[in-house]
Image (spheres, coloured by chain):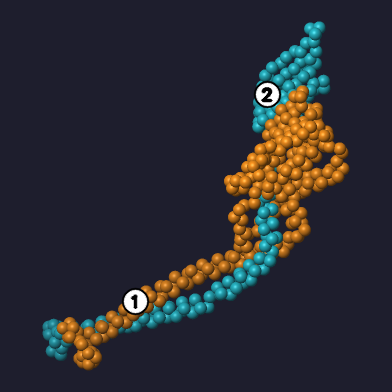
Chain colours: A cyan, B orange
Amino acid sequence: MNKDINLLYSKKQQSLNELTVRVKLFRWVALGALFLVGGVSIILFLLLIASPLPQLKSTEKSLTGSLAQSHEKLLKQTLLSGRLSDIALITAKRSHYGDDLEMLRNELPSGSEITAFSVEKKDMSITVTSQSLQDLETYFDKLKKLTQSKKVLSRVYLTSLEAKVNDKNVTTHFEAVVLLTLL
Amino acid sequence: MMNELNSVRTLGDIRLLYFKYKDTPYFSLAVVCIVGLIAILLLWKAVLPQVGSWFSLQEEVKKTNENISLLKANQTILAGLNDSQLEDQFAVATTALPYAKDYAGIISSIDDATILAGVRRDDYSLQIGDLSTKSAQLASETSLPVKISLKGTVGQMQHFLHDINKKLPLSEVVTVSFGNDGATIGLIYFYKFLPDNLQILYTRPVKTLNQPQITLLKTLGTWKQQSLMEIPTTPEIPQASGSAVTGSDL
């Protein structure tokens, strides 16, 4: 028997029935979607209502009010902290020519002295006088060692070495001008 | 059917259409479409904005919680600060790095250092510069150049250079020229204006002093104390041949 032969329903009626079944299915899907969306919307609404934000804002406001009473203290602490940072920077970067000069004088052999010096930034010039040429040489050696140790000086340059004589043409002392580059 | 829909004019026409199609799948299809449309509209107009609100609310809650933590931390820090100690520390720091050109402090520090080193002070001049312009007041960190002439031995000069670094306000020796006629020393004295737009935010973490800063404060305090102690017991200040304050635009 041919399956296509249907004596109960016409073809139009059959397609209508199929459509009805599909529409019923769509109807359930649409209703489900509507309820789902509605449910989610209600949940979100409840979540928004139950937010702790107003309470937190109130706490924040009361804490801010409490801090406002210590405004001057806070201002001083902030300024102090900033000022100390600046001071630390200044003290770390500024020159210590007194210490440099002390170190150079400590290395002087007895009988020798620094009679003149000038300094600007990292360049220092010293005039050393001594009655003994050997003492001057010893001093230069010490300066060279200081340069090699790379702690205070980076360069030593002997600009001039003069022998000073008196009226009787006798050498009284020696004078050396040394250029130093500070580290 | 479209023609029928187009010819709808009154409520009666709608009722007629309803009764004609209510048992057909078209009616159900129309209901499904309307329900779907409502669901989409609800999603678009209600759910999505609510989701956006929820996320921004969470963000706000998080930010507020952070602010509260910071405020509480600041409150604890401020409660732990001793008022008089803070006052002293602030005074020391502002003496070391004043808010303006501290002429009295500068002159006092030079006097102290010269007395301590035992050198004789000659003329000195402060190059004041421009005070009235806005740029001068807005400069974050500035310095006042000072030139002094001293008479003494090389040892005394060494002491002076050493001592002046331990005097407040803070200064830096920039040039030294020492010879038979004495020494000319170029110094700069530091100061820093108060920021014009200083804003204190309570939600910004209060910076507590770290160990190097506390040590620095102690050192500065010692220097300040030494200066204060020296002034009353100061021996007679060598008479300066004259002092000049030049170039004022006050």
The C terminus of chain B appears in which quarter of the rendering? top right
User: Height in image: B14 above or below A183?
Assistant: below
The image quadrant of residue A56 is: bottom right
Which callout, 1 or 2, points to the residue nearer the camera?
2
Chain designation of label 2: A
Chain designation of label 1: B
Label 1 sits on residue: B40
**In terms of depth relative to the viewer, which is nearer, B100 or B206?**
B100
Residue A39 in sight in this render: yes
- Label at residue A179: 2
Label 2 sits on a secondary structure element that is: strand
**In terms of depth relative to the viewer, which is nearer, A87 or B24?**
A87
The image quadrant of residue B11 is: bottom left
Relative side of A123 to A112, left or right: left
Q: What residue appears at the point 58 percent right and 65 percent down from the top-left corner? A: B66
- Location of residue B138 in the rendering, given as x and y in whole percent from the top left corner: 60, 48
Label 2 crowd bin: few (<14), some (14–19), many (20+), radius 10 Å: many
Q: What residue appears at the point 84 percent right and 37 percent down from the top-left corner? A: B237
Q: What residue appears at the point 68 percent right and 47 percent down from the top-left corner? A: B100
The N terminus of chain B appears in which quarter of the rendering? bottom left
The image quadrant of residue A66 is: bottom right
- Location of residue A16 in the rendering, given as x and y in whole percent from the top left corner: 19, 85
Residue A149 in sight in this render: no
Amino acid on which the number 1 mark rests in the picture: Ile
Q: What residue appears at the point 38 percent right and 75 percent down from the top-left corner? A: B45
The CA distance from mark 1 to mark 2 is 88 Å
Are dots 1 and 2 in contact, CB under 8 Å?
Answer: no
Amino acid on which the number 2 mark rests in the picture: Leu
